[in-house]
């Protein structure tokens, strides 16, 4: 939401506190860098991230968990840029990965294999072999077939694979159905009864070492109650599993999924979220101290970087069609897919202040040949002219990582800001980049 302060619009407090954005002398800044200065240097569109905001969001988890054994493994799928990952590594993060490519990125960024957890329903033989070779912390196993495949490959390599079963607790996360993962109808994880059978199967295989249990129910959750319901079911299951002779759970992977504010949501803070988890843990254990017998693993992604980044685009044209006003910009759904994929809301803010009492409802759209290529519909904004810069807020998670070359559009640049300094962390692709790896076989 845009508020008026001393006659100048700026992102509301939720963005101001997390994204380090402010309006100074009529220009939108991220930390101490004016957005238009970055646009002059690198052109548009581009993603820009605040190193301070990323660090602060991570450290909020770290502080909340300081009195209990834990590993915070950032969900690489949210933002996989090497500089983002290396920044998080410097403040103590591990990595939650779902592909061999994400493992490669995490290792390149210097993240320790002992802090890497491998989730995902479709691990291939080559990916499993790669992860075993690198001695990652554990695999979160999602099916009997995967369990057998990990055991087979580990035997062939002369390795012992550390595993946890990903349990599907059948809890409604109350989020968008496309990012729900904890219901029985979803493809993820094992049912509670199947998980028990899988643990028994793993116990009898010398190539497997049971080290943990995992649960992740979805993304962009703004209500703590589904988390707590899932955790209660998980703790009951842990007691049943540990009653089986020979099984000891060391790691409880509670997944990620904490939501952020895009519009008017009121998600819990990391401290509130962790405090409720501790309450649930105390209900099942007499104390939460350094003697606590488990190490908790958290896999935040969106809550670390969504409000630490934005997509900057330039207005190209304003057109009208039967009373409908379109604002055509140079970014498109290939750059940020969330609005077209999920009908997701992103605040859109003019980068320069201009005193104007004129307000229009715009459909803010990109150049791609799809009706679904939009960032906002009927969005009330002050009048925008061609060549003006716009900032699409809360785009630091699932923005660039979901981007594509659809319509043969080069993917845009990524920039990292640190105080009054900014650096290119991924160059904008060229037309030549579009055809790398392709072969022309016909004259």
Image (cartoon, helix red, strand yellow):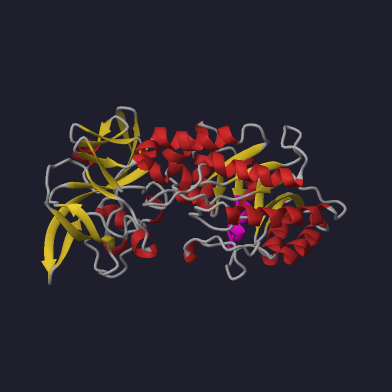
The residue under the point 53% across, 52% down is 257
Q: Which residue: 48% across, 54% down?
A: 220
Instruction: Tell which residue pokes out farthest to the top in this image.
Output: 420
- Residue 229 in the image: x percent, y percent? 64, 56
Q: Is residue 71 magenta?
A: no
Left or right placement of residue 130 versus residue 164 in this view: left
Q: Is residue 108 above or below residue 197?
A: above
Most foreground residue, 32 or 289: 289
Q: Position of residue 264 (x, y in %)?
A: 38, 52
Is residue 94 at all visible to an observer of this figure? no
Residue 124 colored in magenta in the image: yes
Quadrant where the C terminus sits is bottom left
State the residue in front, 359 or 208.
359
Quarter of the rendering containing residue 112? top right
Residue 125 percent coordinates (x, y): 62, 60
Quarter holding residue 422: top left
Q: Count the marks.
A: 0
């Amino acid at each position: 939401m845009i508020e008026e302060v001393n006659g100048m619009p700026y992102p509301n407090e939720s963005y101001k506190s997390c994204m380090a954005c402010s309006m100074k002398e009529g220009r939108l800044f991220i930390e101490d860098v004016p957005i238009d200065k970055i646009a002059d240097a690198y052109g548009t569109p581009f993603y820009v991230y605040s190193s301070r905001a990323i660090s602060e969001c991570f450290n909020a988890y770290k502080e909340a968990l300081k009195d209990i054994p834990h590993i915070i493994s950032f969900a690489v799928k949210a933002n996989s840029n090497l500089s983002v990952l290396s920044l998080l590594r410097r403040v103590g993060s591990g990595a939650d990965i779902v592909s061999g490519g994400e493992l490669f990125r995490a290792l390149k960024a210097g993240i320790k294999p002992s802090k890497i957890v491998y989730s995902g329903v479709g691990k291939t033989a080559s990916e499993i072999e790669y992860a075993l070779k690198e001695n990652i912390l554990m695999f979160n196993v999602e099916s009997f077939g995967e369990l057998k495949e990990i055991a087979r490959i580990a035997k062939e390599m002369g390795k012992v694979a550390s595993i946890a079963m990903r349990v599907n607790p059948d809890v409604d996360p109350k989020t968008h159905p496309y990012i729900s993962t904890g219901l029985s109808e979803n493809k993820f994880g094992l049912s509670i009864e199947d998980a028990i059978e899988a643990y028994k199967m793993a116990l009898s295989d010398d190539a497997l070492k049971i080290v943990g249990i995992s649960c992740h129910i979805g993304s962009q959750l703004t209500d703590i109650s589904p988390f707590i319901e899932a955790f209660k079911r998980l703790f009951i299951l842990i007691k049943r599993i540990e009653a089986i002779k020979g099984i000891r759970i060391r790691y409880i992977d509670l997944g990620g999924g904490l939501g952020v504010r895009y519009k008017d949501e009121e998600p819990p803070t990391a401290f509130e979220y962790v405090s409720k988890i501790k309450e649930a843990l105390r209900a099942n254990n007499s104390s939460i101290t350094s003697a606590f017998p488990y190490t908790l693993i958290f896999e935040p992604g969106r809550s670390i970087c969504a409000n630490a980044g934005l997509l900057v685009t330039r207005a190209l044209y304003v057109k009208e069609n039967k009373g409908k006003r379109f604002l055509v910009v140079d970014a498109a759904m290939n750059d940020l897919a969330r609005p077209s994929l999920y009908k997701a809301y992103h605040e859109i803010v003019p980068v320069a202040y201009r005193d104007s009492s004129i307000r229009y409802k715009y459909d803010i759209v990109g150049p791609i040949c799809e009706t679904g290529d939009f960032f906002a519909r009927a969005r009330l904004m002050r009048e925008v002219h061609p060549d003006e810069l716009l900032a699409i807020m809360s785009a630091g998670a699932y923005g660039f990582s979901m981007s594509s070359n659809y319509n043969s559009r080069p993917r845009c640049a990524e920039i990292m800001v640190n105080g009054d300094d900014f650096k290119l962390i991924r160059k904008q692709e060229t037309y030549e980049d579009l055809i790398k790896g392709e072969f022309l076989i016909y004259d």
